[in-house]
Amino acid sequence: MAVRRRQRLGPGGGRALLAAVLLCVWGRAAAERVRYAIPEELGRGSLVGPLARDLGLSADELPARKLRLSDEKQYFTVNEENGNLYVNERLDREEMCGDSATCSVSFEALVHNPLNVFHVEVAIEDVNDNAPTFRKTALDLEIGEWTLPGSRFPLEMARDADVGSNALLTYHLTKNPSFSLALKENPGGNTQPELVLEGALDREKQSSFELVLMVVDGGEPARSGTVQVHINVTDANDNPPVFSKSVYEARVAENLLVGSVVLRVQATDADVGSNGRVSYSFGSVPDDVPSLFTIDSDSGKVRTAGLLDFEEKNKYTFSLEARDGGGLTSHCEVRIDITDENDNAPEITILSLTSSVPEDAATGTVVAVLKVRDRDSGENGQVSCELSGEAPLSIVASSGGSYKVVTTGALDREQASEHGVTVVARDRGRPALWSSRELVLEVSDVNDNAPVFEEAAYSAYVAENNAAGALVLRVQARDADAGANGRVSYWLAGGSAGAAGAAPLVSVEARSGALYAQRSLDYEQCREFTVAVRAQDGGSPARSSTATVRVFVLDRNDNAPRVLWPAAAAAAGEAAGGAATPFEVVPRSAEAGYLVAKVVAVDADAGRNAWLSYELVQASEPALFRVGLHSGEVRTARAVSERDAAKQRVVAVVKDHGQPALSATATLHVVLAESLQEALPELSERPAGAEEEAAAAAELQFYLVLALALLSALLVLSVALAVLARLRRAGPPAVLRCLGAQRFSLAGAAFPADFCEGTLPYSYNLCVAAPARAVPEAAWPPPPPPVPVLSAEELLGGDSCEKPSSNSSAIEGEVSAQPDLPQVCKIVSSCCS
């Protein structure tokens, strides 16, 4: 015998189905919601749907958009190459949703560049993977033999974890003429199988019956379960227990203390004795009920055995059984509704967090996406979010319980390299519960700051004669940026126009900003110069700034004083080809303070290094002369006397004030005479200090004169022969032309080269014509060394060359014969050649 249970939908169920259909249609049309439906128990890697295509993404966009799923639930995964949604693990609808009529999984799909959130819902459709089962393996019934035919005995209802048509149960009972199977509709919509007595029982004929109750669901393929029904025929218990209510309802709050009374059921039995003693027990109940509730078999009180959680299950429906002592039973239904308490704080899940944001990011840039969920319901599950902390960030609500953290102003890494904020989620329960989550936003650097020098203009002081490569100055510029944007390099940008060649004088080290001298500096050539140093960072594009460095060269005492007079006059005489020594003539009538000469000296240094002082260090008559300390004027210290030697030698030293001091000497030759004519004899004599030198040189002079005479004779003979040969061919000899010229010149007078040191009293002077033919240079003997003489050309200024007399008196006669002889004497060494 088979009876099929019918699934009926009341008005509420129809409206729910219509709302689900409309919601599905609306979800497909919405831009941010995608829905799929798959059967349960699909294997890992099974295709759910083309998620990327449904979101409007092409395959070319996938690498850049970085499609991924939120990690709140890992039931599904998305392929990064094609964007398809696949099953990540086996889905068991009964484990996920229990006996709920609908089952779905919602999650978020994140798309970057730009960041967007799509809500995806996958409905899990039931498949017939659960067979109907009975709680007991065997059912024991006590039926009195006096029981009238048509009596009904409730049997245990089977349970099927599936839903819909897969849970549509059909009961079958093995054929027996004494019993049949009937179905009874309970108020909750469930079908109660009942055993119907078809005929009178006779315990004496048959005291027991063994039947099999089979249940089959409506799935494809169908699944079934069985239970053994043991019927014992008894006597005299003709009144079963009767509950005061067919349905008991209770409403309790979740988290009720264990052992609290939920409700009490009561059943009465009209029988007496053991047949009227009623005991209570669970009938057909789900598996989780015995772990949460207990029933007192004597009192009928239903108590909590575990903690109730509204978020796990908010309604429990099960049956209780009342059995009398005679074995008769009756059943009632218990419905317990769990009310919500605010026992769950909001849960904050970070779906996406940008690791760093550039400081030039625009206002409104999304830096994080959050999902906030409260498992409570009603006001207890309504959540509001806010940010705590001083940061240019705000939080805005998005769809589906998501929130976006966006920037509200400009970011500046130099002021704050990171911003730490706290996301606080608070529900509306009483008392309210809240939770928080820390967010740290790092601000990445952009090159928005140029290097800044510590000073706009630098001054450096370097002593001259420095070593090449010496440190001049170290400049430093700071850049507020970070990394390469703040890495400063230094370059020379150029020098001042007034300092020619200033750029090569120094170089700058690119990393440290140290300026080094390229070569030794000379104060006398360059006293100061200016260079421009540019500091440039490593950003792109690079930023730079410029500072001016003014370098002052400090003087050192590296130049000794240079005597212009009398040293300059002596040098001029030597450059003219002679060894002339200047002298000063002081009349013997000169009084004390008579200006003899002025020593003129200069120093190329500056400051104290160029301050000159003069001092007399040596003199033939130390008491006769003095020199001005600062003027350099040489004056007589006393009146000149007849006892003073005619020739005086004065040596003065010139010192600067450097550290250490440098000096130079100047030598003055002074002749004490009233006139130049009177001074000439004194000049021809050897100086008093030269006797020893003259004695030593007398012997050498003899040999020199002898050699000179021999060489001169040979030279005269050779020249005479050459001249005679040429005269025969070319006419009058050149010697006659030379002798015919003016003999003396009035240009000025001259004196023997070293009258004060001692000279030869004569010299040889030849004026010959050029030879007719070239004579090899090696054939001529080397010319004798020049002997200082008083040249007629220097004395008279004429063009003719004539050998002067070796007699000094003759020379004096010639000089005295000149009426226009100047008072300044020059020393010459030879005649014209």
Image (cartoon, rainbow, N blue to C red):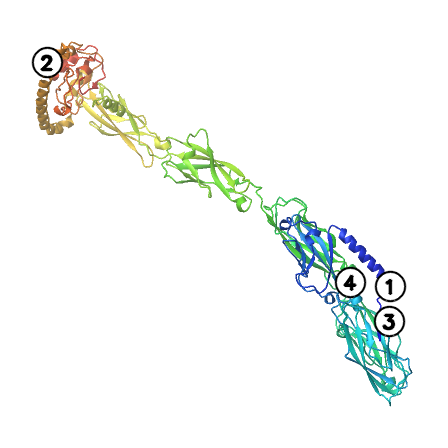
Give the secondary structure at mark 3: loop
The mark that comes first in sequence, 4 or 2, is 4
Is 492 in front, or is 336? 336
Helix, strand or loop at disc 1? loop
Question: Disc number at residue 724?
Answer: 2
Task: Locate the N terminus and report the quarter of the image it occupies.
Answer: bottom right
Q: Position of residue 47 (x, y in %)?
A: 68, 59
Amino acid beneath label 4: Thr
Q: Tell me if 444 is positioned left or right of 7 in this view.
A: left
Q: Which mark is residue 186?
A: 3
Q: Amino acid at mark 1?
A: Gly
Q: Secondary structure at mark 4?
A: loop
Q: CA distance from mark 3 to mark 4?
A: 23 Å
Q: Amino acid at mark 2?
A: Leu
Q: Position of residue 184 (x, y in %)?
A: 87, 73
Quadrant in the picture for residue 784: top left
Q: Is residue 708 above or below residue 278?
A: above
Q: Is residue 551 above or below residue 150?
A: above
CA gap, disc 1 and disc 3: 15 Å
Quick one: SS at disc 2? helix
From the image, state whether disc 4 or disc 2 is nearer to you.
4
827 above or below 540? above
Q: Disc 1, disc 4: CB below 8 Å?
A: no
Left or right: residue 386 versus residue 514 is: right
The amino acid beneath tag 3 is Asn
What residue is shown with label 4? Answer: 102
Q: Crowdedness of circle 4 by 10 Å Cα count: few (<14), some, many (20+)? A: some
The image's mark for residue 10 is 1
